[in-house]
Image (cartoon, grey):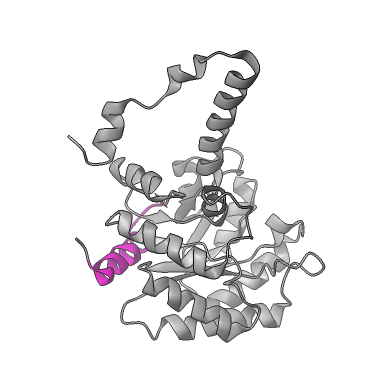
Amino acid sequence: MTTQRERAERLVALHRRAGAFIIPNPWDAGSARMLAGLGFEALASTSLGAALALGQLDGAVSRDAMVEHLRQLSAATDLPLSADLENCYAHDPREAAQTLVRAAEAGVVGGSIEDYSLDPAKPIYDFSLAVERVQAAVEAVRGLDFHFTLTARAENLLRGRDDLDDTIRRLQAFEAAGADVLYAPGLTTLEQVRTVCAALGKPVNVLAPPVKGATLAALAEAGAKRLSVGGALARAAFGALLRAGREMREQGSFTWSADMATLADLRRLLGGA
């Protein structure tokens, strides 16, 4: 069993080595173990996937419930885990920063803080507050006894504010504040990825879907270091469930069973004989 410090060092090393890497997003312990069994080197949680697994909508999971979810994901594999913590469950910078510390206590070795407020009337934090939140997060995680890889997210493009210049301005400020990884979910073209990566000096995480033409090679060439998929894997899995359920309910048939995972694969990926 690897220690938290060892996992932290492995995550840092992934960001320092040449080329890009994929950090997929499991939504429960089973999916985490299967992704580990497929050979991925690190994992990232997904707030949407966690909510779906709990029968809730994204943004409705409490901080305590999310920390417990992260504890279960961390314990499921020996891989480094980075946490999707939304706005860290607080508007106040220091209170938000303490959410990252709680996540670390649950076993994660990295995590994100974003400038999306969850307030429909004012969804993006003002620039100065957004930067102050990242500064507080950096201060809090640097007090841990291992290197916590902090990701700072600029949410404009994902939240209906189509302003790439402001997004880059925010990411540059987050970088200057000490974030380890910068992330602007919602980029849709490789040219946008190139523009963002060229403006920054630290590793950039890219949400691979919905970038047109996204492949590991293409995004690496554009400058990305880390590729995640957010809630897409969970949505794909639940999509298969919905298609199967609708077929049974509406047609009374079971053709969906042709696409089931084999028991042999499940045993292998979950460490069975």
Camera-side residue of 266 and 177: 266
Please state, as top left, top right, bottom left or bottom right, where the C terminus lies in the image.
top left
Percent across and percent down for residue 64 are 51, 69
* Residue at image coords 40%, 83%: 142
Percent across and percent down for residue 124 are 73, 69
97 relative to 65, above or below: below
Q: Main structural element of the magenta stretch: helix, strand or loop?
A: helix
Camera-side residue of 95 and 223: 95
Q: Is residue 6 magenta?
A: yes
Q: Is residue 183 left or right of residue 120?
A: left
* Residue at image coords 67%, 71%: 169
Please state, as top left, top right, bottom left or bottom right, where the N terminus lies in the image.
bottom left
Q: Is residue 174 left or right of residue 226?
A: right
Q: In which quarter of the view is residue 120 placed?
A: bottom right
Percent across and percent down for residue 192 are 64, 52
Percent across and percent down for residue 135 are 55, 83
Q: In which quarter of the view is residue 200 placed?
A: bottom right
Which stretch appears magenta?
3-21
* Residue at image coords 71%, 74%: 125
Q: Is residue 148 visible?
A: no
The single residue placed furthest to the left in the displayed view is 273
The single residue placed furthest to the right in the displayed view is 121
Camera-side residue of 112 and 85: 85
161 relative to 63, above or below: above
